[in-house]
Image: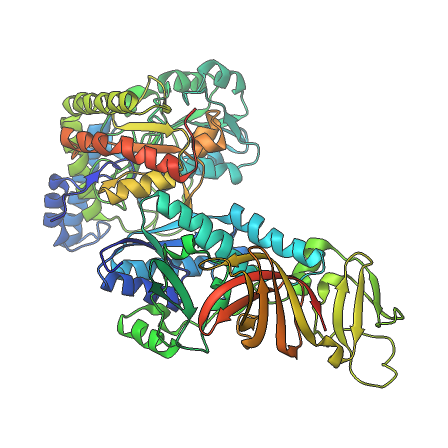
Amino acid sequence: MSRPRVYLDHAASAPLRRSAVEAMSAAMGVTGNPASLHGSGRRARALLEDAREDVADALGAHPTEVVFTSGGSESDAIAVLGGWRARRETRPRVIVGATEHPAVIGVTGEVPGTVVAAVDADGRLDVEALAARLGDDVGVVSVQGVNNETGTVQPIAGIAGAAHRHGAWFHTDAVQAAGHLRVDFGGSGADLASVSAHKVGGPVGVGALLVRREVRLPPYGLGGRQEGGVRSGTQAVMLAVGFAAALREAESARETESARLAGLRARLVDGIVDGIVGVRVNGGVHVSPAIVNLTFEGTRADDVLLLLDREGIDASTGSACRAGVHQPSDVLLAMGRTVAEAGASIRFSLGHTTGAADIERLLGVLPGIVATARDASGYAAS
Amino acid sequence: MGDRMRVLVAMSGGVDSAVAAARMVRDGHDVTGVHLALSKNPQSFRSGARGCCSLEDSHDARRVADRLGIPFYVWDLSDEFAERVVDDFVNEYAAGRTPNPCLRCNESIKFSAVLDRGRALGYDAVATGHYARLDRDGDDVVLRRATDDAKDQSYVLGVLDQDKLRHSLFPLAGTTKPEVRAEARELGFGVAKKPDSHDICFIPDGDTAGFLTRRLGTRPGDVVDEDGTVVGRHDGHHGFTVGQRRGLQLGRPADDGRPRYVLRIDPVDNRVVVGPREHLAVARIDGIRATWTQYPVLGGWRGLAQVRAHGEPMPARIDSDATTMSVLLDHPATGIAPGQAVVVYDGDRVVGSSTIARTEA
């Protein structure tokens, strides 16, 4: 009998919540295109709008501000690329943080003259330095709420305020914030915010872009102009329903869950720092309770992950793979780490199914695993 | 052996290593598949459906691992491969020698970098899809030719020593290629019909001379006959190998009108020496950097010598010490060049190898 696996990769994809399974099971049998005017269509549309209202309610937005998308990456692209296209005539510049998700960093290749705002050793943006880059040529500023690799929380309110003082739109990738930190779209000062269902225990394949009503985005892709004309394609009613159910559940339990996860995270960090030498905790003190990123000096992350996998523990580096090989994390490199340090770093991410026993099982095997991985890379502790 | 082991299978994406992995699983071992990424830019290697380096191959290997239900990882060994295999290949040609990169890869990547890393990570052995047999002689592991002569790959494994062989497994041992393909079909592997790879994996178009020219540039020099008379020009001696006849582009025919062959490369004077076929004959080979599969054989003994992956085993008298060997062929042979490996056998048992430093008629 093999023991159940310990899943510490919630930031990659969280296990589906029961509430989402039940809501989707009920919606699965519903026939109809929400754009159709007949009875079946009306029923599908009602489910979709119920989901939209729930998502809006959970995130402090108005239902008309919710644009359903295929997920976080599409939301980011619609926001940043769309925002730039909407304003490029008068405000052609875009500013993004150096540690943004690839879905945002990817636009730097499409938008000439994108400014990448530097972060400090903890991965945090300097609001003053970013403000100094602002001018009346900047159309969009995009900074994530919580970094997906390190859990670093950005000073969103300050950045939003600075952006607005210069007339720029502010977009935040809130994919890793939702469900763990309060996301109050209306009160945050953000003009655009991206969220993803499967990071909060909803299904993969759906997300939302919150768009403040005063903001007009051009269509992204061509077609039937659904979702306020921004995102064409028949809406995935069942997925939206699952998304709403998961987000509702996550939000209703958020305060107690965040405190619980913060306790687990503290136990994990203390246990690792006490039990293993040559460890650095990345991400600083302003950090999500759900993510911990550690550098195990003298290891190859791939070896640590292989050994964890063998012990039945799922974790990741959090950074991009190319052809099945982890690449040194651009996020950690932007934080000033060396290629060797970036290549020796692991992300553990926690969530609604994580319990104290999971953390203890990890702590039980990790010192041996790190020692083995150091041996495999020929590292001699100094 | 015989007990349940933790085995790392090097999975190229081809049919041989796929079946090797399946047999390790069938035998009850705790198996992990690993594909070696040997280029920083996988697309720059093969673009077809074969070889050891392309994205398709990695995908094919992963799909076999999926079917077997074993963990699968890709290990990036591109830096080691570039330095120890590709650079070595280029440097050897620049020095007028003819290297065997597959053998070098086995020696310094698969059964070195991968084996060492695997052992450190707790694996008992590395298994590959090579066609060769291992058996026991007391405490020693003995490397022998595969049963299928046509596929025998013992030559490219001849550089392995006892320490490496003790932690190596060749599950295809006594199988023929058609049997391996049939087994892959029965297992439902998509790679069952995948063609064999023959080329050098980092030269996907097969144009070795072109590859070397890109790396080494053009270095014009003379083509001379054995008297030193200039009979033509070349763009770089690295474009030639001993025994080559085609592509010499000689300005004038030989006095006797017979075809001429590359007899040797003289890197110091950047000359390619040509002459008649019979002058290619080599009776004595001197090898350096000897390796031994079990123990150094000291003194003189009779055995078989092989100088190419699928070359003929040639009866010879061998005189060896721990680091060198001289091989006196019973019947002189052609197409033997410095840089090639000579692998020596006692019957079907691989005894050792060395790198050919010089040859004599």
Q: Position of residue B248 (x, y in %)?
A: 77, 73
Residue in front for this viewpoint, A346 or A196: A346
Residue that sits furthest to the front in the current view: B299
Colour pattern: rainbow
Q: Is residue A41 above or below residue B177?
A: above
In the image: residue A360, left or right of residue B282: left
Asked whether the viewer can see residue B299, the reply is: yes
Residue in front for this viewpoint, B84 or A215: B84
Q: Position of residue A376 (x, y in %)?
A: 39, 40
In the image: residue A57, left or right of residue A87: left
In the image: residue A113, left or right of residue A299: right
Residue in front for this viewpoint, B117 or B300: B300
Residue located at (15% from left, 44% from top): A47
Q: Is residue B155 above or below residue A204?
A: below
Residue in front for this viewpoint, B192 or A363: A363
Q: Position of residue A301 (x, y in %)?
A: 38, 37
Quadrant in the picture for residue A246 = top left
Q: In the rendered view of the protein, which quadrant contains the N terminus of chain B?
A: bottom left
Residue located at (12% from left, 54% from top): A29
